[in-house]
Amino acid sequence: MALVELETGGLVCPFPLIDAKEKMKQLSPGDELLIKFDCTQGTESIPNWAAEAGYPVTRFEQVGTASWEIVVQKK
């Protein structure tokens, strides 16, 4: 199992989500994707996408005034 980091700070929505979807395609089952983002819309769109795709969210936290990290596992 690997943890892959995706830095999307500075990108406006929906680009963090688009990048996350593309990166997730490259991962193996069991791998986790750490998405770092500062787009407030991503706080809803990324967890919703993960739930719809059947990817568990193993961590989701605000790490700054306007920045978040979410870890999504590929099943």
Image: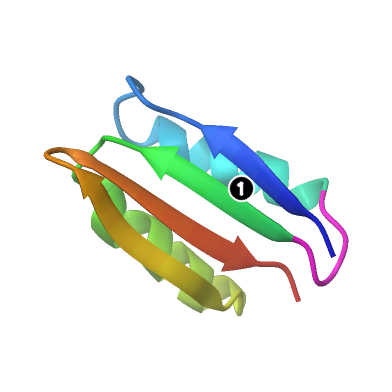
The residue to which callout 1 is attached is: 21
Query: Looking at the rendering, in which quadrant would you find the N terminus?
Result: bottom right
Q: Does the magenta stretch include residue 29?
A: yes
Q: Is the magenta stretch mostly helix, strand or loop?
A: loop
Residue 56 at x, y percent in the picture: 57, 78
Residue 2 at x, y percent in the picture: 81, 56
Q: Which of 47 and 3 is in front in this view?
A: 3
- Residue closest to the far left: 65
Q: Is mark 1 on a helix, strand or loop?
A: helix
Write the start and end of the magenta stretch as one range: 27-31
Left or right of 29 in this view: 58:
left
Query: Looking at the rendering, in which quadrant would you find the C terminus?
Result: bottom right
The quadrant holding residue 53 is: bottom right
- Residue closest to the far front: 63
| Residue at 61% across, 80% down | 54
| Residue at 57% across, 44% down | 20
Left or right of 24 in this view: 69:
left
| Residue at 78% across, 62% down | 31
Up the image or down, 24 lies above or below 60; here it is above
Q: Nearer the viewer, residue 48 or 38?
A: 38
